[in-house]
Amino acid sequence: MDSAATYEVRDIKLAESGKKNIEWAEAQMGSLMVVRERFRKEKPFKGVKIGIALHPTKETAVLVRTLVDGGADVAICACNPLSTQDDVAAALAKEGVKIWAYKGETKEDYYRYLNKVIEFKPHYTLDDGCDLVSEIHAKHPQLIKDIIAGAEETTTGVIRLKAMEKDGALKYPVIAVNDLKTKHLFDNYLGTGQSTLDGILRASAILLAGSTVVVVGYGHCGKGVALRAKGMGANVIVTEVDAIAALQALTDGCRVMPMEEAAKLGNVFITVTGNKHVLRKEHFSVMKENAILANSGHFDIEIDVKALKEMAKKVEHVRTSFDKYTLANGKNIYLCGEGRLVNLAAAEGHPSMVMAQSFCGQALAAEYAIKNKTKLKPGVVNLPEEIDNKIADLQLKALGIKFDTLTPEQIEYLKSWKEGT
C-alpha cells in the first residue's frame, strides 16, 4: 500500500494508467464536460469542502475533476470494499485529490477511510448508500452545524434517508439525486442491466442463452437486468413482493412466481432489491447443481452469505470474483464477487456515457444546494424538474441529437380547456 498525508492507495505507480482511463471516460461524458467548463469559469464551490463516499471509478474521477475545477476542496473514499479501480485512485492521488481507497478493503480500512473523509469536516456530503451520512449522524453530530447539504446517488441510500427522515433523525438537507428521471430511468435501468451481466460473465464465463435467470426484484434495476438477460437468450423468472411490479414483469414476458418455486428452477440468480436476505438458507438447499448467485444491490446482505458459508462443507476460490460452495448435500453453488455489487466487484461498473447523466445530476445538485443553502430544510430534497430537463438537453446535445419544440398554437392549446371535439 502507498500512503501519504492526503492519500492511501494500492500503488501510486498506477497513476499513468488511471489518467488514461479517466481521459477515456471524459471522451464519452460530453454533457458533464459542458458543466465542467462552466464551473471552471464561475467557481460555484470556492471555499467549499466536499466529502465523497462513491465508487472510485474512472467516471467518478471525472465528477471529482469537475468539482475541483468548480473550486471545491475534495476528499473521497470508497462506498464499497470491492468497487475501487486502483489505477484511478492512484491518478487522483497524484493530482492532489485527498483519497483513501483500494480494491478489496478490509472492513476496518473501509470505516477508517470513511472517517478520514469525516475528519476532513466537509461542508457538503456526496454519498452512495448513505454510509457517510449515517456515520456522521451517529458518531459525529457536532459536524452537522457546518454541513450545508448532501446528495445521495442510489435507491438503497434514498430508502435509508427516508427512514431517517421518518424517525426525525436526518438533521441536514440531502438531495435525492437517484430520484432524477435522468438518473434512475437510465443509470439504474440501462447501466445496471448491462454492467451486472458484464460482471457475471467476466466472473463465470457462462453462456446465458438457454439458461434460466431468476431476477429478484423488478424495480428500475431489475427491469434492466431482465431485459438484457432476455436479449442474450435467457429464460427469465422474476420474483417480487409488489403486485404492480409483478404484473409489469408478467406483461413484459417474464414468468412470475415466489422464490420458493424459482429457487428450484434457476441457473443464475441476480438480486436487485435493496433489501435483506432475499436469497437465504431454504433457497440454497433446493437449488440446482452449479447454480450461480450474484448481487447487484448496494449492500452485500441481499444474499445471506453467512448462511451459505455455514451450509458449506468446503469453499474454494475458482476464478477471479468466483467462489464455489460445496454444500453438505453434495451440491455446488457458485457466488460472484463475494455477494457484493457484481458489476463493480467483477467488472468496471456502468458505462461512462450513462454515468455522464448521473454525474451531471450530482454536479448540479451540489451547485443548487450551495446557491439555496438558506432555503433548504433538513430532510430528503428533490431537485426542480428544470434541472432534470437541463441534464437531458445537455446529453442530447453532446450526442448530436436534435428534437422538436412546440409551436405557439400547440402551447396555447395545452394551456386551454375550451377546445374539444
Image: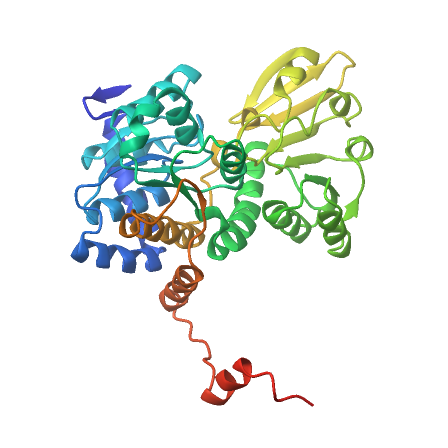
- Residue sitting at 37 percent across and 48 percent down? 362
At horizontal 79% and vertical 47% (from top left) the residue drawn is 255
Where the N terminus falls, by quadrant?
A: top left
Q: Which color scheme is applied?
A: rainbow
Vertical placement of residue 417 versus 208, above or below: below
Q: Is residue 329 left or right of residue 226?
A: right
| Rendered location of residue 109, percent (x, y) | 37, 18
Q: Tell me residue 326's x, y (percent).
A: 69, 16
Q: Where is residue 320 in the image (x, y as percent from the top left)?
A: 51, 26
Please name the residue shown 73% across and 39% down the image: 241
Q: In this view, does 131 lie to the left or right of 10?
A: right
- Residue at image position (50%, 40%) is 158
Depth order, front residue of 363/291: 363
Image: 257 above or below 104: below
317 sits left or right of 113 in the view: right
Tell me if residue 415 can be seen: yes
Position of the C terminus by quadrant: bottom right
Would residue 10 be visible to someone looking at this image?
no
Residue 238: x percent and y percent? Answer: 73, 43
